[in-house]
Image: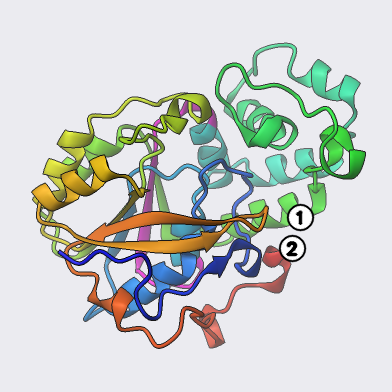
C-alpha cells in the first residue's frame, strides 16, 4: 500500500478556483476534489457508461461529470428528504418554478421566518424551503439544531449567502442537462449493492458520515449513521472502478488496508484559506501519483462549462 502526505503532482487545490455548479452551500462539499475526479476518469481506458454517486449531497462531483460529459450518464443518490426534494424538483418538471421562486423571493428576517413557519405543502415548496435554509442557516447546515445566521459576511446577516440570480442560473443550468442525470432518493449502500456487478459503471463514494473520532457527521447531517465496515466490504467487491474519500484518520486507513485498497492523502485549501488533508482510496491510484502538476486544466471545447454557472 502506498500512502504519502502528498505525492508528486498532487498540489493543493483552492476551492475558489473551481467552477461552482451546485445550488447548495454544503458542509463537507467536495469542490476541492473536482480536479482529481478529472484526473481519475481521464486515466481510465474508456469513458464510463455510468457514473454513480451513492451519497450525492450537494452533488458538485456528479454535476461536474454530467456537465463535462466525463461519463455517458450520472446517477445521483441521496437519502435525505430535504436534499432529495431539491434534486427531484430541479431534475423534474418544476425546475422553472423553483428558479423563479428563488429569484423573486424578497429575503428579510421576517420573510424567512414566515416562509419557514409551517410545513411545505408539496415537493417543490419543500425544495424551496431547503435551499432557503441552506443559504440562511449557519454553515448551510440542515440538521436539527442549526439556526439562522446573525452576522454573516461583512455584517450582512442572513443575506450574506443569498445570491438569487446566481442560484436561478445554476438551477436552470442543471435542468438543461437533466437528460444526462438520474436521481434516486434512497439508500446509497443499497444502490452500490445493486450495481456491484457492473463493469461499465464507476463509483464515487463520499459518505456524509465519519468513521473517525471527529464525528463531524453527527453535527452536520440528518442521517449520520453508517455501517462503515459494510461499506468497505461491498466496495471491495465492486467489479467497476471506484474512488472513495474519507477523513484522513488511522481508523479509516486500517479499514482501507484490510480491504486491499490503495490510499493517498491529498491537500486542499478551504474557503478560509486553511490547508487540510483528506484520504483518497481506490483500487489503483497510480494516476494520482504520476501527474506532472496539481493544476488540472478545465476541459475546453464542447465540454467547457457555461460561464454563467461559475458565478
Picture coordinates of residue 111, whole percent (x, y):
87, 23
Picture disc at residue 96: none
Residue 134 against residue 103 in the figure, above or below: above
Residue 66 seen from this side: no
Picture coordinates of residue 71, whole percent (x, y):
35, 69
Query: In this figure, which residue is indicated by the disc labeled 1?
Result: 166
Residue at image x 21%, y 44%? 192
Image quarter of residue 24:
top right
Picture disc at residue 311: 2
- Depth check, front residue: 151 or 3: 3
Residue at image x 82%, y 44%? 103
Classify residue 198 as left or right of residue 130: left
* Mark pair 2, 1: CA separation: 6 Å
Q: How crowded is mark 2: few (under 14 residues within 10 Å), some or many (20 or more)?
A: few
Q: Is residue 16 magenta?
A: no
Picture coordinates of residue 247, whole percent (x, y):
38, 46
Secondary structure of residue under mark 1: helix
Q: How crowded is mark 1: few (under 14 residues within 10 Å), some or many (20 or more)?
A: some
Classify residue 252 as left or right of residue 179: left
Image quarter of residue 278:
bottom left
- Depth check, front residue: 95 or 61: 61
**Colouring used for the render:** rainbow
Where does the magenta region start and end?
Answer: 67-82
Residue 210 seen from this side: yes
Q: Do the residues labelled 2 and 1 touch (CB within 8 Å)?
A: yes
Residue 171 against residue 157 in the figure, above or below: below
Amino acid at each position: 500500500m502506498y500512502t504519502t502526505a502528498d505525492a508528486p503532482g498532487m498540489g493543493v487545490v483552492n476551492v475558489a478556483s473551481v467552477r461552482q455548479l451546485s445550488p447548495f452551500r454544503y458542509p463537507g462539499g467536495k469542490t476541492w476534489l473536482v480536479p482529481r475526479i478529472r484526473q481519475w476518469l481521464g486515466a481510465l481506458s474508456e469513458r464510463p457508461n455510468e457514473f454513480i454517486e451513492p451519497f450525492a449531497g450537494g452533488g458538485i462531483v456528479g454535476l461536474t461529470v454530467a456537465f463535462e460529459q466525463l461519463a455517458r450518464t450520472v446517477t445521483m443518490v441521496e437519502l435525505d428528504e430535504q436534499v432529495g426534494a431539491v434534486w427531484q424538483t430541479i431534475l423534474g418538471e418544476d425546475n422553472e418554478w423553483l428558479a423563479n421562486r428563488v429569484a423573486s423571493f424578497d429575503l428579510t428576517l421576517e420573510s424567512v421566518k414566515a416562509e419557514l413557519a409551517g410545513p411545505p405543502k408539496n415537493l417543490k415548496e419543500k425544495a424551496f424551503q431547503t435551499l432557503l435554509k441552506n443559504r440562511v442557516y449557519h454553515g448551510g447546515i440542515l440538521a436539527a439544531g442549526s439556526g439562522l445566521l446573525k452576522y454573516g459576511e461583512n455584517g450582512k446577516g442572513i443575506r450574506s449567502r443569498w445570491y438569487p440570480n446566481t442560484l436561478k442560473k445554476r438551477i436552470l443550468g442543471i435542468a438543461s442537462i437533466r437528460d444526462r442525470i438520474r436521481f434516486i432518493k434512497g439508500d446509497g449502500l443499497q444502490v452500490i449493492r445493486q450495481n456491484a456487478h457492473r463493469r461499465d459503471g464507476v463509483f464515487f463514494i463520499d459518505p456524509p458520515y465519519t468513521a473517525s473520532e471527529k464525528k463531524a457527521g453527527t453535527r452536520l447531517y440528518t442521517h449520520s449513521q453508517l455501517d462503515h465496515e459494510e461499506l468497505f466490504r461491498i466496495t471491495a467487491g465492486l467489479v467497476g472502478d471506484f474512488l472513495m474519500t474519507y477523513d484522513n484518520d488511522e481508523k479509516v486507513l486500517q479499514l482501507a488496508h484490510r480491504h486491499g485498497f490503495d490510499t493517498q492523502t491529498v491537500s486542499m485549501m478551504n474557503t478560509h484559506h486553511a490547508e487540510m488533508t483528506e484520504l483518497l482510496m481506490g483500487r489503483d491510484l497510480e494516476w494520482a501519483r504520476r501527474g506532472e502538476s496539481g493544476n488540472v486544466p478545465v476541459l475546453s471545447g464542447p465540454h467547457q462549462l457555461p460561464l454563467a454557472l461559475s458565478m
